[in-house]
Image (cartoon, rainbow, N blue to C red):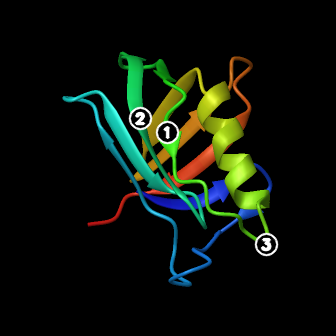
Amino acid sequence: WKVLQAGEIRNPISIKSKEALIFEFNAGELTFFGDLGCNTIRGKIKSIDPKNIEFGPGASTKMACIDMSVENEILKAISETKTYQIAENQLTLLDQNGALLMLFQAVD
């Protein structure tokens, strides 16, 4: 999944590759992995059903980066996600009040 939006930040890119940030979610193995812009994160999906999802805290690399704004928005989104929606090849992560935290586009 390509990150289209994290909080108010649209189309964030990797500091290293200058390409879109990509996340992988494996519901079968209850894991996730993603590019935070500078660092990477991997962790467990604590619970998932057709509407609700909760992520574990994950473990990330700890490189010091000049701009941590994207990384901070993504980490906040992961910790606050309670529900999700998939429609028209997009995945939306939402908080407990239904507010958008992150938006992804399906990629091959």
* Residue name at image x 50 percent, y 83 percent: 17
Q: Are marks 2 and 1 in contact (CB under 8 Å)?
A: yes
> Is 16 displayed left or right of 108 in the figure?
right
Location of residue 21 with respect to 45 vertically, above or below: below
Question: Is 44 in front, or is 60?
Answer: 60
Check the image and report above or below for 71 versus 93.
below
* Residue denoted by label 1: 59
Judging by the rendered image, the residue that carries numbered circle 2 is 43
Residue 96: mark in rendering = none
Q: Using the image, tell me which numbered label, if any, was put on residue 66.
A: 3
Whether residue 88 is visible to the viewer of this picture, yes or no, is: no
In the rendered image, the vertical position of residue 51 relative to residue 76, given as above or below:
above
Q: Answer left or right for 32 relative to 8.
A: left
Left or right: 38 in relation to 90? right
CA separation in Å, label 3 and label 2? 24 Å
The answer to whether any part of residue 14 appears in the image is yes
